[in-house]
């Protein structure tokens, strides 16, 4: 009798777990959005895709992060140079006149 009881204690939770799993999968299928078929498919590749940065990116860049900033195109290099010049002017506004000579 002890063997049958132990076996029942092992089998019953497994059956219960199986029923809960089946109910969860069935519930997830019924909650699926019917408009999912109309969504666009985006194919991804393992390549790194560089995004072009615009002038606003460099204008919003913190002055402390300019040392790590990189520029790939001529326009980006020009915008980075403008941002560095603006940060330098901000620094010079608060520095003593003796340092500016």
Image: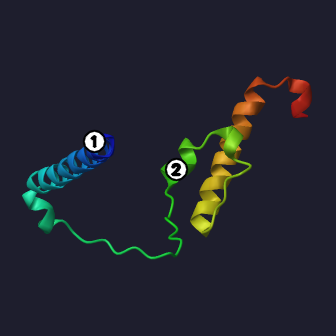
Residue 76 occupies quadrant: bottom right
Q: Which residue is mark 2?
A: 57
Q: Residues within 10 Å of mark 2 (few under 14, many from 20)?
A: few
Residue 4 coordinates in the image, percent (x, y): 27, 46
| Of the image marks 2 and 1, the number of the one nearer the N terminus | 1
Question: Image check: 56 left or right of 91?
Answer: left
Of residues 92 and 9, which is closer to you in this image? 9
Q: How many marks?
A: 2
Residue 8 coordinates in the image, percent (x, y): 26, 45
Question: Image check: 62 left or right of 29?
Answer: right
Q: CA distance from mark 2 to mark 1?
A: 75 Å
Q: What residue appears at the point 22 percent right and 69 percent down from the top-left corner?
A: 40
Of residues 84 and 34, which is closer to you in this image? 34
* Quadrant where the image shows the N terminus: top left
Q: Residues within 10 Å of mark 1 (few under 14, many from 20)?
A: few
Q: Which residue is mark 1?
A: 1
Question: Image check: 89 left or right of 9?
Answer: right
Q: What residue appears at the point 91 percent right and 34 percent down from the top-left corner?
A: 101
């Amino acid at each position: 009798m002890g063997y049958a009881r132990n076996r029942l204690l092992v089998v019953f939770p497994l059956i219960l777990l199986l029923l809960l799993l089946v109910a969860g999968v069935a519930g997830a299928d019924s909650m699926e959005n019917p408009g999912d078929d109309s969504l666009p498919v985006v194919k991804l590749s393992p390549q790194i895709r560089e995004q072009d940065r615009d002038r606003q990116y460099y204008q919003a860049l913190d002055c402390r992060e300019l040392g790590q900033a990189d520029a790939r195109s001529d326009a980006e290099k020009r915008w980075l140079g403008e941002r560095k010049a603006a940060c330098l002017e901000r620094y010079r506004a608060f520095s003593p006149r003796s340092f500016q000579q």
